[in-house]
Image (cartoon, rainbow, N blue to C red):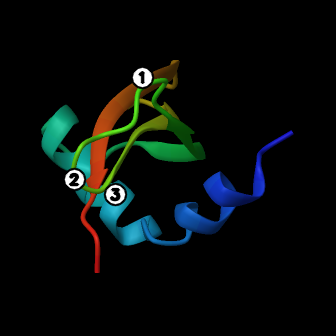
Amino acid sequence: MEDLESAEHEEEISGEDVNKILQKYLGGTKFVVIRKALKPLATPGMLGRHENLEITFLNSSGVKETQSFFVKFLPK
């Protein structure tokens, strides 16, 4: 079960942003996002919040992959 804080912050990363991240990572646009989730890091960051964005997607070959990306949320 996702904790409320993680679910709340997931809205800060739009589907458009996730697509841009995967386009840059994969070098193309042939993928389908299945799931995205923010996972808090065990040790908090010194400035802002640090989390891992875990994206599960189907690649251009139809193979399911999961990739994690480091995300830093700066204080507002």
- Chain-order first, disc 1 or disc 2: 2
Residue carrying label 1: 61
- Chain-order first, disc 2 or disc 3: 3
Q: Tell me the residue at 22%/53% (across/down).
A: 47
Q: Which numbered mark, 1 or 2, is in the foreground of this view?
A: 2
Residue nearer the viewer, 2 or 24: 2
Mark seen at residue 47: 2
Instruction: Tell me which corner region of the image, top left, top right, bottom left or bottom right, holds residue 69.
Output: top left
Secondary element at tag 2 = loop
Circle 1 Cα neighbour tier, 10 Å, few/some/many (<14 / 14–19 / ≥20): few
- Quadrant assignment for the N terminus: top right
Q: Position of residue 61 (x, y in %)?
A: 42, 22
Mark seen at residue 19: 3
Q: Is residue 12 above or below residue 30?
A: below
- Quadrant assignment for the C terminus: bottom left
Q: Position of residue 34 (x, y in %)?
A: 62, 43
Q: Position of residue 11 (x, y in %)?
A: 55, 71
Q: Which numbered mark, 2 or 3, is in the foreground of this view?
A: 2
Secondary element at tag 1 = loop
Amino acid marked by disc 3: Asn
Marks 2 and 3, how far apart at CA: 26 Å
Marks 1 and 3, how far apart at CA: 17 Å
Q: Which numbered mark, 1 or 3, is in the foreground of this view?
A: 3
Instruction: Tell me which corner region of the image, top left, top right, bottom left or bottom right, holds residue 10.
Output: bottom right
